[in-house]
Image (spheres, rainbow, N blue to C red):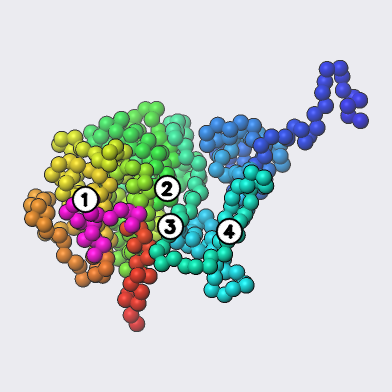
């Protein structure tokens, strides 16, 4: 009997009592980068000692070691997050179909399983059979994204970065010889350090699968660095002009457009504006995923409008008339820019308003001029571009609508753009 060996004043604590507390299970394996990190394998159970932000202190119930763990790599035991759902890499359209399963009892009908909470029974799964269809499509479901690495808001200069090559003010580097990252540096005289940090803080606020992810900021001394995820194909503009990009067919170009619209729809919901949306500020991964970058001009807006300071510079050929003439920016100004971006995509990176100077464009827009349809542009896509270029900003579509239309582009125009033999 262990209690018989205790001295006066001592208390016997069983192993079960010691490990009593919040128990989590690892969703993914993690190899610690720092000495204070706790490495673990997928499926390993951990006891949370302290929860603080995105990094928790925990103890492994397998190795008995303690250290810091990324909170988005674990989930409480016996919760839905620990189940193998295999849906982390599907888009919103596929996610809708994933939720629906065809029951064996009735061919052609669907069932929908929904997690709900019952005060008496706790978490329950309710199964519904869909008996009637509805001609109007319901709002799309946005699948949650899983961060590849936990966001680290600030990074001390002692953490080594190993530059491999540079392109302008961007570097491709390796953080601790393992994680491939892109490093943006502040060019002398281009913008203040405060404005540079505001861009980093904005990137930290806006977190979405179609926006370039911020990893860290080095601020201890100049030069200042913003460290982001690495996008292997570079800017969309350069990629479209490359041998690989110039061979892409229209369906992939439409997919690029839908991905960008999805990212802008998120910015729209967050009540932000980008103000510099163009192909040069969209990056492409090795898996041909598009992500919006360069938030140097982005702003949070109040009363749905932002007025730029006098003398501010903007890319004229991508900027809406009301923004050029009055410095008045709204999310509808970004919609105008998106229409110009569609032109860039469908022409494989050509400059908009070919043969026209910035002043020519400003005069032409005041007279109601719009770029004509190109031979490579389907009439249906050009119609979308024209809605983005409506003279009255309030008549332009939302990004949520644009995403929906572009996601379903080939469903709506089925049979018209089949590959010819």
Give yes or no for contact between labels 4 and 2 (Cβ–Cβ under 8 Å).
no
Extent of the magenta region? 383-401
Query: Which comes before the other along the chain, label 4 or label 1?
Result: 4
**Is label 1 in a helix, a strand or a loop?**
helix
Query: Which comes before the other along the chain, label 4 or label 3?
Result: 4
Tell me: 224 left or right of 52.
left
**Is label 4 in a helix, a strand or a loop?**
strand
Query: Which comes before the other along the chain, label 3 or label 2?
Result: 3
Q: CA distance from mark 4 to mark 1?
A: 41 Å
Tell me: 374 left or right of 259.
left
Q: Which residue is mark 4?
A: 113
Tell me the residue at 83%/27% (across/down): 12
Q: Measured from the top left, where is residue 75 in percent x and y? A: 61, 44
Front residue of 114/31: it is 114
The residue most toward the top is 8
Q: CA distance from mark 4 to mark 3?
A: 17 Å
Q: CA distance from mark 3 to mark 2?
A: 16 Å
Q: Magenta span: helix, strand or loop, mainly?
A: helix
Tell me the residue at 35%/70% (across/down): 412
Q: Measured from the top left, where is residue 39 in percent x and y? A: 62, 41
């Amino acid at each position: 009997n262990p209690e018989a060996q205790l001295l006066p004043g001592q208390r016997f604590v069983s192993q079960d009592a010691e490990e009593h507390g919040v128990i989590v299970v690892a969703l993914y394996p993690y190899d610690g980068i720092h000495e204070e990190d706790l490495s673990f394998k997928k499926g390993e159970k951990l006891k949370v000692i302290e929860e603080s932000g995105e990094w928790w202190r925990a103890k492994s119930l397998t190795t008995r070691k303690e250290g810091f763990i990324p909170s988005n790599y674990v989930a409480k035991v016996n919760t839905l997050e620990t189940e193998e759902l295999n849906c982390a890499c599907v888009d919103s359209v596929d996610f809708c179909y994933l939720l629906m399963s065809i029951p064996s009892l009735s061919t052609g009908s669907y069932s929908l399983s929904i997690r709900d909470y019952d005060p008496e029974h706790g978490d329950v799964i309710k199964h519904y059979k869909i008996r009637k269809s509805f001609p109007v499509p319901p709002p799309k479901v946005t699948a949650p994204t899983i961060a590849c690495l936990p966001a680290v808001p600030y990074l001390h200069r002692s953490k080594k970065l190993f530059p491999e090559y540079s392109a302008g003010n961007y570097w491709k580097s390796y953080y601790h010889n393992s994680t491939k990252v892109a490093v943006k540096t502040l060019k002398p005289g281009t913008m203040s350090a405060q404005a540079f940090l505001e861009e980093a803080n904005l990137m930290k606020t806006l977190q979405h699968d179609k926006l370039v992810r911020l990893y860290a900021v080095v601020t201890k001394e100049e030069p200042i660095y913003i460290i982001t995820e690495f996008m292997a194909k570079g800017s969309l503009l350069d990629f479209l002009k490359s041998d690989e990009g110039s061979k892409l067919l229209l369906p992939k170009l439409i997919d690029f457009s839908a991905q960008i619209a999805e990212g802008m729809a998120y910015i729209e919901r967050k009540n932000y504006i980008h103000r510099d949306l163009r192909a040069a500020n969209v990056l492409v991964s090795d898996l041909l995923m598009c992500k919006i970058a360069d938030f140097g001009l982005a702003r949070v807006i109040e009363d749905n409008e932002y007025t730029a300071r006098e003398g501010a510079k903007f890319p004229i050929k991508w900027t809406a008339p009301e923004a050029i003439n009055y410095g008045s920016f709204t999310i509808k100004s970004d919609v105008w820019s998106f229409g110009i971006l569609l032109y860039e995509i469908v022409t494989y990176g050509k400059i908009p308003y070919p043969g026209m100077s910035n002043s020519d464009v400003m005069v032409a827009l005041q007279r109601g001029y719009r770029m004509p349809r190109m031979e490579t542009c389907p009439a249906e896509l050009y119609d979308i571009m024209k809605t983005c270029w409506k003279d009255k900003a309030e008549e332009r579509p939302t990004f949520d609508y644009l995403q929906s239309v572009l996601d379903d582009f080939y469903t709506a125009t089925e049979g018209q753009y089949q590959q010819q033999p």
